[in-house]
Image: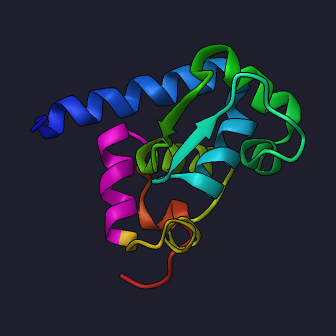
Amino acid sequence: MPHEEDRSSERDTVLGTILGLLGKGATLELVEKAGGARLYVPEAPAPESRIAKLVGLPAAQALSKEFAGIAVNIPLAKLWRVSVYRERGMSYADIAIKLCTSETNVHRWLRTLGLTKTREQDGAAGP
């Protein structure tokens, strides 16, 4: 049975490969719609294929260049998504809602990434 570090490294590699093929916007769309699922990537995606319906035919065709004929474990990519959402100006609360997690987790993940701000900078009220 693989260790958690092995699975984490595999997820990071898959995310990096997808990012390289699709770019940030389409990758975000994919992980928001299918993160945590195994998704089959056909060798020649058709417009009616599940992958094409999720991310569009051009993105599905790009994915098939690397993942043709296999089922890909689409990562949840929560840490990466937190950084993208914060980069887009979302508050801790909005990020927490988007990821179905707590603001405490959002803060912890952003701290891990070196992206935390004070409560005043984030617009939070009260001490």
Tell me where residue 46 appears, x and y as whole percent. 86, 35
Which residue corresponds to the image point at 39% horizontal and 49% vertical from the top-left?
110
Which residue corresponds to the image point at 40% horizontal and 71% vertical from the top-left?
101
Magenta region: 104-115
Left or right, 25 with reference to 80: right
Q: Nearer the viewer, residue 78 or 58?
A: 58
- Dividing the picture into quarters, in which one does residue 13 lie? top left
Left or right, 14 with reference to 58: left
Question: Which quarter of the image is occupied by the N terminus?
Answer: top left
Q: Nearer the viewer, residue 29 or 1?
A: 1
Question: Which quarter of the image is occupied by the C terminus?
Answer: bottom left
Tell me where residue 5 appears, x and y as whole percent. 17, 33
Asked if the stretch drawn in magenta spans residue 12, the answer is: no
Tell me where residue 57 appears, x and y as whole percent. 87, 35
Question: Height in image: 94 above or below 109?
Answer: below
- Dividing the picture into quarters, in which one does residue 102 lie? bottom left
Question: Height in image: 108 above or below 58?
Answer: below
Which residue corresponds to the image point at 79% horizontal and 44% vertical from the top-left?
49
**What count of labels does the image hold?**
0
Which residue corresponds to the image point at 11% horizontal and 36% vertical from the top-left?
3
Task: Please name the predominant secondary structure of the magenta segment in the image.
Answer: helix
Left or right, 49 with reference to 125: right
Question: Height in image: 43 above or below 33?
Answer: above
Tell me where residue 89 appears, x and y as whole percent. 67, 54
Q: Nearer the viewer, residue 126 or 70?
A: 70
